[in-house]
Structures are given as structure tokens and as C-alpha cells.
Image: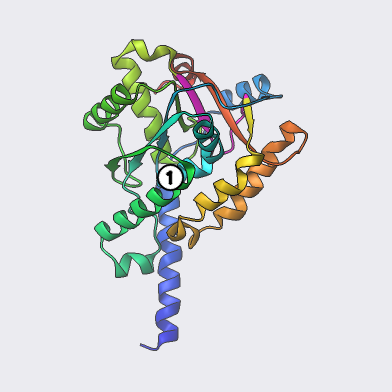
Amino acid sequence: MPDREIGFLSRLLGSLYRAVYRVLALGAIRAPMQLLLKLSRQNAVPAVMGVPAARTVLVLAPHMDDETIGCGGAILQHVGAGARVDVVFVTDGAMGFDAGARRVSSTGERVELRRSEARAACERLGARKLHFLDLPDGRSQANASAVRALHDILADTRPDVVYLPFLTDSHHDHQTCNALLFSLLANDPSLASLLCACYEVWTPLYPNTVVDISEQMESKMAALACYKSQLALNNYLSSVRGLNAYRAIANNSRGYAEAFYLTTLKEYAALAPAD
């Protein structure tokens, strides 16, 4: 088969692969309309503030890059203030490649590549330790084993604040992060007062808090640039810069900002719609 035809088929397969992945991983979640209307009324004018005071911070990231996209600037601020930041990567990240990459590398190689990119990015952010739950990318579940693993990490780190994707974020694996934390609360009511800072990735949220990250923006971009395998699929450098510039509207459009829904775990769990 001529090289031109091989190239065409490779691009076609890549497009089909990404389309199926988006349907399976992104299309299954629809944000509850009543919740969105409630949040839009409550958070019409979010507060502009710095990151919450914390000695230890735990970031739940569904995939390697979500921590930088959603709260990279906040991580840098926490580290700059002397806090210890740990990052928990929930899935193995094996699905984050096009068809061509899947053909030329094994699952193990793809997972290790994502891990090496995460290590480089988190080193730039200043995170102290990385944890990998290795749930299957795109098919993650908040099973008993994963809940126990996260419980052990929380017991070890004793965070003052946990960052995670907001519950209306339209990606299955992002929902798993919420399910894990809600399961922990159900098993351990003492976690009710744990502070949660919920960030946005795939789906913009109605924030009650906006953090000015203008001074951290270029460092955040440098960390995001470490994810070369993901930048080959999406121009995150452009889209994230645009999102953070848009969020600065709350700060009179000065510089860049990240948006969060800040609340206690008990209050956050109460927002989740009943099954």
C-alpha cells in the first residue's frame, strides 16, 4: 500500500478512535440542569482571593495533565507559600493517544510515557510526591480497592484542602474522582469538614472563588508543555491560556485566573444528585 494511503488510513483511524473515546468517556455525563441554575444564581459574582491557607494539599487528577490544566497556578501558589503538595493520578492514562501511537507502542509503554510526563510537569509545579491509582483510563470505577488506596493516602498526607474536578465536569473519569471522595465520606463522617477546591477541565463551572494566577501563568504553561503526547492531540497551551484569561474577568480582566468551587466535603456531597 502506498505511503500516502497508509497515512490517510492512519489519520482516519485516529479520528475514529478519538470520536469513540469522546462518546464513551465524555458523552455519558450530563450536568443536572437544576444544579447548574442554582449555582449560576449563587455564584454570579465569585470572590477573588488567594489560595486557601494550607500546610498540606492533595490534588486528585483523573489523568496526567488535569492537575496542571485545572489548578496548576494554585499548586504553584501553595508551594510558594511553603505548603506540601501531593498529587494523586486516578487513571493510568493509557487511552490518551491516537490510533498511530496505539499501533507502535504497548499499553505499558504508553502508561510509562504518561507517568514520565507527569513527573516532569509536577517537578516544575513543585509537587512533593506523586501517587498512581492506575484505574483503567476511560473505564475507571470507584471500587473498594481504589477507595481503600485513596483512604490510605489521605491518612498519610492529612491534607488541609483537596483539589478535584467539579461534579458537573463531563468526563467519566472525572466523575470517578468525586465518587471516590464521596465514598470516603460515607465511610468516615469525620471527613465532613475537609475543604474541597473543585476545578474545571472539560466543562466550565459556576465558581464561587477565583484565584489570580498572573504571576504563576508562565510557570504553569511550562509545566503543561511537558505533556507532549497530549499536546499532539489538542492545543491545550492555547485553550488553557484562553480559559485562564477569561476567568480574569472576575478580576477586572487583569492577567490570568483559575476558577474553583470552594466548600466543605459535606456541603459538596450534598450537591450531588441522587442516583
Instruction: State which quadrant residue 269 falls in.
Output: top left
The residue depicted at 29 percent of the width and 22 percent of the height is: 155
Residue range highlighted in magenta: 195-208
Camera-side residue: 203 or 75? 75
- Amino acid type, mark 1: Cys
Up-down: is 81 above or below 66? Answer: above
User: Would residue 233 appear left or right of 149 to someone viewing this image?
Assistant: right
The residue depicted at 75 percent of the width and 38 percent of the height is: 254
Give the dominant element type of the magenta stretch: helix, strand or loop.
Answer: loop
In this rendering, the count of numbered labels is: 1
Camera-side residue: 173 or 120? 120
The residue depicted at 57 percent of the width and 29 percent of the height is: 260
Quadrant where the C terminus lies?
Answer: top left
**Other residues around mark 1 within 10 Å, as few (<14) / some (14–19) / many (≥20):** many
Up-down: is 140 above or below 96? Answer: above
- Element under label 1? helix
Quadrant where the N terminus lies?
Answer: bottom left
Residue denoted by label 1: 122
Q: Position of residue 99 (x, y in %)?
A: 37, 66
The residue depicted at 63 percent of the width and 48 percent of the height is: 241
